[in-house]
Image (cartoon, rainbow, N blue to C red):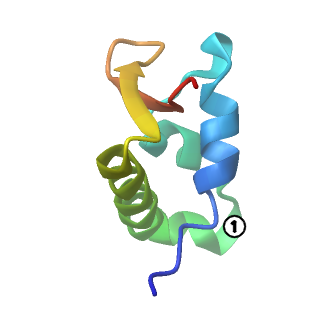
Amino acid sequence: MRRESQYIDSYLATAEDPATRYTPDTYLAYTLRGKARDYLQHYVQALMAAINRRVAAGTVVPIRSLRGSTAYIRKSA
């Protein structure tokens, strides 16, 4: 069984708000502190893998971010 990114739930909760609809990269850049920032790209890869699994499962959809790139939100029921 795969481990999920520890940031998947908090990212999706943050992206629900149009005022904080960030890309995964931007979200992690704002969230990570200290030594963890040295490994930003590893965290981004893990978060994107978790997001891609949820997109494939149909529970998450891509949407425009604040600045026109791609953010992800939970699919409405």
Residue 44 horizontal/vertical position (percent) = 42, 58
Identify the amino acid type marked 1.
Gly
Residue beneath label 1, please? 34
Q: Quadrant of residue 65?
A: top left
Q: Is residue 21 above or below residue 52?
A: above
Q: Quadrant of residue 41?
A: bottom left
- Residue sitting at the far front: 77
Q: Secondary structure at mark 1?
A: helix
- Residue at x 38%, y 41% (from the top left corner): 58
Residue 10 horizontal/vertical position (percent) = 70, 47
Locate residue 17 relative to residue 47 in the image: left or right.
right
- Residue at x 65%, y 57% (from the top left corner): 32
- Residue at x 62%, y 58% (from the top left corner): 7
Locate residue 41 relative to residue 7 in the image: left or right.
left
- Residue sitting at the far bottom: 1
Residue 43 horizontal/vertical position (percent) = 47, 65
Residue 30 seen:
no
